[in-house]
Image: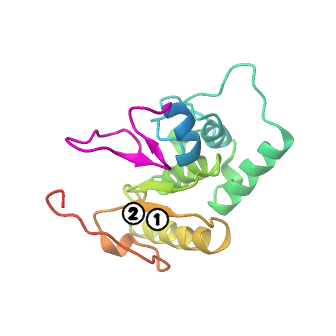
Amino acid sequence: MALRDLRPRRGTVEVLGKRLGRVDMRRLRSHVGPRHPLRSPLMVRDVVLTGLMTSVERVPRWSPTHDETAAVEGLGGLRGLGGLREARRPVLSRGQRPRALIARSLMPSPQPLLLDEPATGPDAAGREQLIDRLEVLGLTRFERASVLVTHHLEELPPGTTRAMLLRDGR
């Protein structure tokens, strides 16, 4: 609901003090990270930059600043994608794709980091690497709340401080 993938059947939803339905979602997305599906075979660095623009494509006639380029490089290294910045997204492995999307989500420095099943897709080794990187991320870079949605408790990073279990919407 925070990403507007679902609407509540009753009641209201507030994200960062803004009531959904009464807030410009483009502005809100810059605080919770992009969620748009990517369609084009963008290079990894462009995938990450679309997070800054909260768009699915690079904005025409726009160039990142030196600081933004440095941020892309830093996030690529943190996510283990530093050597792949020129690679196109479709050629990434099933383990590398979610890491590129997490780096994309981090570009606008979201206040809560929302991760919707980030470990879906990679094989067992890729899942372990992703969980390890999420733990490093939580300890070294991201000092804000994060929400990770998963169907598998073993995918929770070791530093998880709270968990909410849902069953039948409760």
Q: Which residue is mark 2?
A: 123
Query: Mark 2 Cα within 10 Å, few/some/many (few <14, many 20+)?
Result: few
Q: Is residue 25 left or right of residue 71?
A: left
Q: Secondary structure at mark 2?
A: loop
* Magenta segment main secondary structure: loop
Magenta-drawn stretch contains 21: yes
- The quadrant in which residue 142 appears is bottom right
Label 1: state its secondary structure.
helix
Residue 108 covered by magenta stretch: no
Which amino acid type corresponds to the residue marked 1 in the rendered image? Gly
Q: Nearer the viewer, residue 105 or 95?
A: 105
Say which mark, if any, is on residue 143: none
Above or below, comparing residue 17 to residue 26 in the picture: below
**Residue 118, image x, y percentages:** 43, 57
Q: Residue furthest right?
A: 66
Residue at numbered disc 1: 126
The residue under label 2 is which amino acid type? Asp
- In the picture as drawn, the residue positioned furthest to the top comes out as 61
**Would residue 67 appear left or right of 49 to someone viewing this image?**
right
2 left or right of 25? Answer: left
Residue 99 percent location from the top left of the image: 54, 55
The boundaries of the magenta stretch are: 1-24
